[in-house]
Image (tube, rainbow, N blue to C red):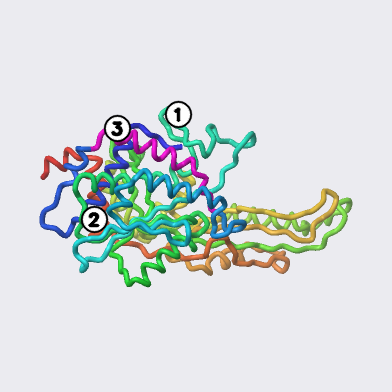
């Protein structure tokens, strides 16, 4: 579900507009201030955008790499989604260039005036993960209803990530209708159809297409984090709002542990804990009790150092400023791992058991089984790290466990870390700030 309070919808809408204007017009000496455009956004605009998002959520754009051709479980639903977007945003299809890539993905180009300036790419995706429906569903509202209920909008994609598709299209439409028809530099919007299963056919195809056309990008804006409107009260002065701007993405790898042992009748199981289920359980328990060592690396250290000035506690402020120190870094990393699953995830490479399979009958000891381990890799950890880590947990039954790198998504290391001191980062930060605090920006102008 996704809250749709009018003020919040205006903020999401406004950030998209501010970011587009700062990006597209940053090379001009003077340009229309985003405040002049933001002032024209009304509650009616917000309500209309919510309605369009609700209709978009109703499209069952589920991606599936295992059972679906072109990774589209319901091809007709992706076509319906594209028709909805085209009908909802006619000015974009009239003034910009929109093309379908790999049958279902959407690439939109807003041509700029100055061909010497490298374009900027904004990325989102049309697809969602599956959702259980019917009597066995745990959803309070049907997952593809797009229901607007109790000031929330409900459904798959409300958070990940259909709302961003709508926010970008709303922002571009509003700029076009405000007379901003020709930016200084070219802008691309790329909406893939299979991001949830790796994006190989959608985003991959669009990347190859742009490369074949000789397009070199200035920077890419992908999905990011939320704005913590209540901040971190236990850490910072209150109220201190925090916008989480992602400058890197963790790596991804999945390892399948195949276990084999002597099978037999369940009436006489071995007493040395050597059954397939026992070996699987021992391995899972060892991993669960001994997760990867916590450590702070960029961009987490960049984030902590940015928080330091707003921390009222002098001792803690000092630690935040020096979190990349060999003494304070491990200490702070340890504290983060003990705070919550979310904070623990930023301080270590994570490993989670996602599947366990064994057995075929209730009176037979299985002779084989498997456990799937999913890793999200910190910057600096290679694709070989998960195998090395798991080998240290095989124990006395190592000869009966075979590790295999697998996964529905293509294994990859963490992305390079973008610098928070770069011009591109400052554009994003400025767009967020002037949207959340428009009056302060206007007073400084």
Q: CA distance from mark 3 to mark 1?
A: 18 Å
Q: Is residue 136 left or right of residue 149?
A: right
Residue highlighted by disc 3: 44
N-term-proximal mark, 3 vs 1: 3
Q: Quadrant of the C terminus?
A: top left
Verify whether residue 12 appears in magenta.
no
At numbered mark 2, what does the secondary structure look like: helix, strand or loop?
A: helix
The picture places residue 354, in percent across and down from the top left corner, at 61, 53
Mark positioned earlier in the residue sequence (2 or 3) = 2
- The answer to which of 217 and 284 lies nearer the viewer is 217
Q: How many labels sit on residues? A: 3
Q: Residues within 10 Å of mark 1 (few under 14, many from 20)?
A: few
Residue 343, given in percent of the width and then of the height, sits at: 44, 48
Which mark lies nearer to you, 2 or 3?
Answer: 3
Mark 3 vs mark 1: in front: 3
Q: Could you say which disc has been placed on residue 23 in the image?
A: 2
Q: Residue furthest top?
A: 150
The residue carrying mark 1 is: 149
Residue at 34% from the left image edge and 35% from the top image edge: 48
Point out residue 432 in the picture as x, y percentages from the top left corner: 26, 46
Relative placement, left or right, of 112 versus 64 is left
The residue positioned 53% from the left and 61% from the top of the image is 409
Q: In this picture, which residue range is highlighted in magenta?
A: 41-63
The residue that appears at 37% across and 65% down in the rendered structure is: 416
Q: Residues within 10 Å of mark 2 (few under 14, many from 20)?
A: many
């Amino acid at each position: 579900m996704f809250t749709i309070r009018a003020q919040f919808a205006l903020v999401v809408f406004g950030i998209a507009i501010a970011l587009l204007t700062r990006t597209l017009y940053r090379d001009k000496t003077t340009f229309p201030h985003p405040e002049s455009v933001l002032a024209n956004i009304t509650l009616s605009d917000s309500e209309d955008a919510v309605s369009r998002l609700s209709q978009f959520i109703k499209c069952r754009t589920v991606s599936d790499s295992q059972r679906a051709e072109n990774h589209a479980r319901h091809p007709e639903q992706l076509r319906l989604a594209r028709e909805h977007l085209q009908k909802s945003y006619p000015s974009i299809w009239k003034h910009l260039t929109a093309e379908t890539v790999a049958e279902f993905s959407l690439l939109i180009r807003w041509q700029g005036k100055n061909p010497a300036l490298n374009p900027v790419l904004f990325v989102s995706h049309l697809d969602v993960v599956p959702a259980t429906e019917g009597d066995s569903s745990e959803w309070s509202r049907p997952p593809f209803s797009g229901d607007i209920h109790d000031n929330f909008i409900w459904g798959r994609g409300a958070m990940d990530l259909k709302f961003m598709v709508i926010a970008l299209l709303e922002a571009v439409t509003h700029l076009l209708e405000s007379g901003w028809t020709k930016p200084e530099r070219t802008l691309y919007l790329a909406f893939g159809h299979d991001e949830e299963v790796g994006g190989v056919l959608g985003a991959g195809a669009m990347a190859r297409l742009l490369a074949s056309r000789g397009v070199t990008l200035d920077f890419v804006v992908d999905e990011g984090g939320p704005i913590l409107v209540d901040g971190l009260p236990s850490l910072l002065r209150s109220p201190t709002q925090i916008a989480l701007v992602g400058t890197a993405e963790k790596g991804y790898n999945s390892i399948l542990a195949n276990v084999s042992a002597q099978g037999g009748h369940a009436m006489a199981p071995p007493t040395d804990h050597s059954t397939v289920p026992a070996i699987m359980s021992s391995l899972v328990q060892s991993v669960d009790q001994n997760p990867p060592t916590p450590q702070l690396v960029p961009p987490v250290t960049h984030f902590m150092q940015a928080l330091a000035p707003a921390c009222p506690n002098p001792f803690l402020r000092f630690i935040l400023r020096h979190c990349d120190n060999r003494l304070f870094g491990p200490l702070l990393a340890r504290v983060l791992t003990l705070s919550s699953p979310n904070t623990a995830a930023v301080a270590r490479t994570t490993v989670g058991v996602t599947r366990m399979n064994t057995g075929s009958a209730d009176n037979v000891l299985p002779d084989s089984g498997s456990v799937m381990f999913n890793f999200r890799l910190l910057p600096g950890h290679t694709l070989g790290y998960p195998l090395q880590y798991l080998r240290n947990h095989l124990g006395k039954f190592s000869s009966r466990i075979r590790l295999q790198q697998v996964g529905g998504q293509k294994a990859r290391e963490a992305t390079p870390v973008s610098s928070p001191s770069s011009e591109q980062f400052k554009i994003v930060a400025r767009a967020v700030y002037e949207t959340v605090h428009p009056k302060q920006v206007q007073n400084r102008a």
